[in-house]
Image (cartoon, rainbow, N blue to C red):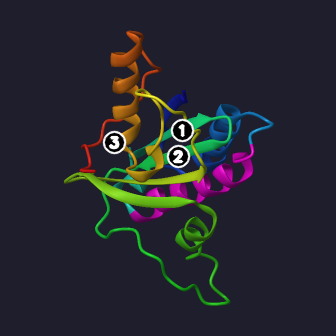
Amino acid sequence: MWLSLEVRLAGLPVQIPVARRFVADALGDGHPCRADAMLLASEVGTNAINHSLSGEVGGSFLLTVHWTEGWARVAVADQGAAEAPCLRRAGLGEASGRGIALLDELAVRWGFMRRSVRGTEVWFVLGEPPRRAGVHGAAGVQDSEPVSLIRVARASEAATGSRSPKVPFSGPSRPT
């Protein structure tokens, strides 16, 4: 079973350290994905501010963290960008342009989805989710982010009759 937290932050550069601290506090001192999750959350949050309406006056972004003992999934939802996130090569003298390259290097999986006409969610996974056997097991969770998290929670509820932790996911379902 995983835990989830989310926070909406103002689309200002001074909020990036707040985003890092939120991820650090959620995962805790001993979590094996903590350092990479903090780094990548700050990169993706910075991209939301620099490349979307989230960085405009009154803009914001939503930061969501799902985690278990050895696994973390972090998502940043912005308020709309003209272009999809893409990998590019930054020149030696450039101060920016390495965020997606870091994401591609450090994350087990990452991706993005258009949440609506005005919004993109960039997500990444670090570590591996626990696998359990049985009807309500988590096998296959990593294969179809993010909808599988919801399906596993619903399957667990159906099998055990108890509710799983709330998964705050407001984006559209993705086909598996």
Residue ID for mark 2:
74
Instruction: Provide residue 161's location: percent of width, then percent of height.
Output: 38, 9
Horizontal side of residue 159 vs 24, given as left or right: left
Residue at 37 percent of width and 41 percent of height: 148
Instruction: Provide residue 50's location: percent of width, then percent of height.
Output: 47, 63
Q: Amino acid at mark 2?
A: Val
Q: Nearer the viewer, residue 54 or 77?
A: 77
Residue ID for mark 3:
147
Q: Secondary structure at mark 2?
A: strand
Residue 122 visible here: yes
Extent of the magenta region:
32-51
Residue 168 visible here: no
Q: Secondary structure at mark 1?
A: strand
Say if 131 sits above or below 85 in the image. above
Residue ID for mark 1:
65
Residue 51 numbered tag: none
* Magenta stretch secondary structure, dominant: helix
| Residue 82 figure quarter | bottom left
